[in-house]
Amino acid sequence: MSALLVTGGAGFIGTNFVHYWRRKHPGDLVVVLDALTYAGIRANLAALEGQPDFHFVHGNICDQRLVEQLLRGHSIDTIVHFAAESHVDRSITGPDAFIETNIVGTHSLLKAAAAVWLERDKPRENRLFQHVSTDEVYGSLGPDDPPFHEDTPFAPNSPYAASKAAADHLARAYHRTFGLPVITSNCSNNYGPYQFPEKLIPLFLANILKGQPLPVYGDGRQIRDWLHVEDHCRAIELCMQKGRPGETYNVGGDNEYANIDLIHELCAILDRRFATDPALAERYPDAPPAKGIPASSLIAFVTDRPGHDTRYAIDAGKIARELGYRPKTDFPTGLASTIDWYLKRE
């Protein structure tokens, strides 16, 4: 049995991880720490409230004293660190929050873990700080460049990516300098249930249902590797169970798609759903498919955002070889199931 502190557990990936872990490891204690900023939604965890061995704490990862109290009070042996500001556009217009949460907040967590776990005469084994990061720390790839691997030099191009790169460096430093047991995982673009509708898939889905434009940056040919959030949760589980402290593991979905191709696929799925389910037209009368018009008619190309990375791609060979990870969800199936999840939850 383990006792986990999950930071950002009311956010997108954190919520999915908490539900995943409770299903797979029902005997473990899970304590969620979340500041409930705009993208943290406590209702995501409503089904777990009141269950034994689950606790929700409304608090900030920058509060080192609170984190130390939680680590000691619940005998926490594992920190799974999701809490982060993660929207690139927001980092361009307001970078301060990204520096505060992603850098200062991560440092506060590391300090708290070191203070509690590395006390004299305390065993260090069976402790883990699982630091969850992004492939954006590596920068941008050209069309024919090999995918990012764990030794790819960092070259962040947005304040968000730079703040996550700094957090990664701090996590590594606390392992190298103080012996804190840290594993870092860098993942590609996640999608799936519970994602806040500022990210591409839920945002464009919501816009279609409201009959609003689908703003596509530049020519829409930017390429991303899409990872279903449950595959990501399985990868984190493998890191926690089999990973080596001090190591970094890249996690990908093996699904490279250009943004414009993804958007056309999303539109096509919505067209088919409206064609086969007349109730959708009653619920969403402003959606073009409700009027027999293709959803793709809403696509509107707009000026590209500053520092927009051209391509991300992940070489997940290390986590496959060492930990046995393979993504299970192919993108067309995962995208369709994600859209259906949202359609059922207006």
Image: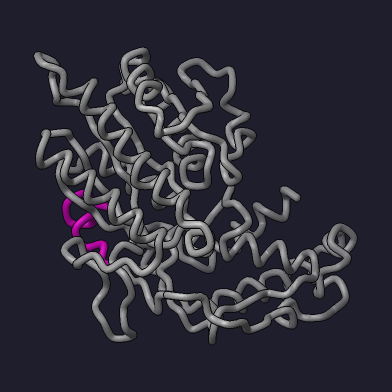
The secondary structure that most of the magenta stretch takes on is: helix
Q: Magenta segment: does it hold 297? A: no
Magenta part of the protein: which range? 315-325
Residue 32 x, y percent position in the rendering: 46, 29
Horizontally, is 284 left or right of 52 in the view?
right
Residue 265 x, y percent position in the rendering: 60, 75
Q: Residue at x 15, y 18 (%)?
A: 119
Q: Nearer the viewer, residue 268 or 12?
A: 12
What's the coloring here? one colour
Q: Tell me the quarter of the image containing the N terminus.
A: top left
Q: Nearer the viewer, residue 151 or 94?
A: 94
Residue 116 x, y percent position in the rendering: 24, 20
Mark yes or no: residue 229 visible.
Answer: no
Residue 149 x, y percent position in the rendering: 21, 65
Circle count? 0
Quarter of the rendering containing residue 286: bottom right
Q: Where 300 falls versus 8 (above or below)?
A: below
Q: Residue at x 40, y 66 (%)?
A: 158
Mark yes or no: residue 293 visible.
Answer: yes
Q: Residue at x 57, y 65 (%)?
A: 200
Quarter of the rendering containing residue 272: bottom right
Horizontally, is 16 left or right of 204 in the view?
left
Q: Residue at x 72, y 48 (%)?
A: 345
Q: Nearer the viewer, residue 8 or 202?
A: 8
